[in-house]
Amino acid sequence: MTPRDDGGAAASGVIPVPAGIQHSLISLRGVSKSYRRGGQIVPVLNGITLDVQRGDFLGLMGPSGSGKSTLLNLIAGIDKPDAGEILVDGVDITRLGESELADWRAGSVGFVFQFYNLMPVLTAFENVELPLILTSLSRRERREHVEAALGLVGLADRMEHYPSELSGGQQQRVAIARAVVTDPKLIVADEPTGDLDRHSAEEVLMLMDRLNLELGKTILMVTHDRRAADRAHAIMYLDKGELSTGGDIHERSVKEARL
Amino acid sequence: MNSIKLIFRNAFRHKLRTGLTVVGLVVAIMAFGLLQTVVHAWYAGADAAAPNRLITRNAISLVFPMPLHYRDKIRAVAGVRRVGAANWFGGIYQDPKNFFPQFAIDPGPYLAMYPEYRLPEDELRAFLRDRKGAVIGRKLAVTHGFKIGDTIPLQGTIYPGTWTFTVRAIYDGAAANTDTSQMFFHWDYVNETIKARMPRRADQVGVFVVQIDDPARSAEIAQAIDRQFRNSLAETLTETEKAFQLGFVAMTEAIVQAIRLVSFIVIFVILAVMANTMGMTARERLSEYATLKALGFGPGYVARLVFGESVAIAFIGAAVGIALTFPVAAWFGAKMGTLFPVFNVSGETLAMQAGCALGVGIAAAILPGRSAARVKIVEGLRAIG
């Protein structure tokens, strides 16, 4: 991760891009986003500039409404910025049309959501297989990939179980298997432990550690959880649309908790 | 796992809701089929009409007869092959509710003109030999339990008195839409009896059935027949058998139109129910559609899931509804007795039922499918909680 924070100047996007930026998996330049609420335009992100290196595990923290999820959504290509550019592995995803962006997401991004977002009518196996329908893999190849992914998250024996038959932690592990089954470069996780008890949360975080360390996945994780943030290699702190380096993560968390 | 499996699992996710919707569809499709069969039954006579048969009647009205001697003049018209007299008898068998059509006919030419009435040769000969004999259709025989040799007493309404006929032949229909609820007997016998009882009403014919050589010349021959009797006391109106039958339908056109309208209202009502079901379904699954789109599925795929589910539910309802139409129509036809001589569920009705079900399935999914396809991923994901 190359935090482009220089006394707040990076957030305004005025710092020139340093040499070596081409090695970043993710590069944001002057990204802004605002929402219209009740006839008023509310700015959420103000000229964010950020670089994330391949293989990084970056935690995004900040108070509620600070724009963490918005930033994650923009990087994952499920929302579009008002201004600025977002390069992921050399592709400026802000220039992609809806269809191209969908194709790009299918091949490049794995999603882990707070509430798992599994299809309740599909088994664990079928949920993990879902993204592979968009590929040209044969049925046999799909089965191999799914079994490998579920094996990775320790749920090889729960393949035929429906989400309602699994605990929250197990459901989140199925969601992680679904996120990695297409072997994406980037995994985005929005509060992945937010709906889990401590033990399940720990299992999920260990799993994300493994994805990062053993499989080399680049992970962007939004979290309010200090223990979850501790797993990240680096923390970025977002407040009032401005991005800054984490500094003392514990201090930040206490401050955030007070807020 | 494939999309079809996902569609069917989604369709039965809310078993009660889907079950009630399917029940509604079954009732609607079945009711539609039954009402369309009633409409079809109304037109059965016209549908069974042959293009080489003309009907000559009194130009003023069907209730006024024509002199018997017209028969020879009509037979002499170029292009006419056969002519047979036929009188509507209108007798009552035991009770007015036991209605069935009875005709006094010229047996030889008349039956020769209706090859769709199939009767055994020996029974035909027995009928032709017996002046008080009668030919009845299979449906009539089954309805009242008549068999060969039975006597059928009829209380005359147009021709007063009690008339007794002996069943000498039972005919079957060559096609499913052949009317086998009728009774025929000798016009000569009826005429001779009338001559004795009411001489002034003798030698009068209700209609002449005319068989022609070339159906393409029907208009020309009809005009030639009517020209023969222009400026006479009983001018004639000759038309094709189909036009003649449609004339009867036209008398009750408003009822037919009302039945037809009701059948489509039934479909419209189930469309509203189905659209509501699909609307609720789509609203509940916004987060799932958003998740699918986040995973890389396009709006078209999401819309196809909604359309597929709607069409699948409609298909199940239609299949059961169509299957039930047959026994219900058979029961209804039996209850109606000979009021509807032909009461069969036609291929056209089945196609309309299937078409309506497909239309309902597609139309009900238009708005929900559009919403699902257009859901913004970020907003859809937020909908989860």
Image (spheres, coloured by chain):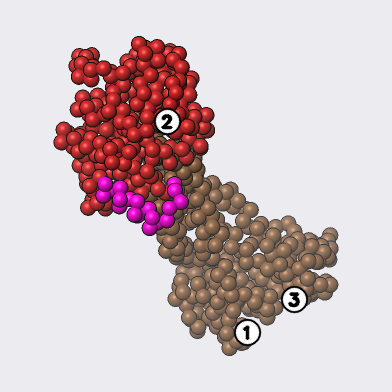
Chain colours: A red, B brown
**Pointer 3 chain:** B
Q: What quarter of the picture does the C terminus of chain A occupy? A: top left
Q: Which residue is mark 1?
A: B128
Nearer-the-camera pick, A250 or B96: A250
Q: Are marks 1 and 2 in contact (CB under 8 Å)?
A: no
Q: Which stretch appears magenta?
A: A134-152
Residue shown at 48% from the left, 24% from the top: A85
Q: Which residue is mark 3?
A: B82
Q: Position of residue B314 (x, y in %)?
A: 44, 50
Secondary structure character of the magenta stretch overall: helix
Q: Which residue is mark 2?
A: A23
Name the mark nearer the viewer: 1 or 2.
2
Nearer-the-camera pick, A78 or B226: A78
Q: Mark 3 vs mark 1: which is more N-terminal? A: 3
Assess disc 2: are there few (<14), some (14-19) or many (≥20) residues with their C-alpha within 10 Å of its C-alpha.
Answer: some
Horizontal side of A7 relative to B218 (left or right) equals left
SS at mark 1 in the image: helix
**Pointer 2 chain:** A
**Pointer 1 chain:** B
Answer above or below: position of B290 versus A5. Answer: below
Q: Single out the residue that lies furthest toward the left.
A: A199
Horizontal side of B171 relative to B376 (left or right) equals right
Q: Position of residue B58 (x, y in %)?
A: 73, 61
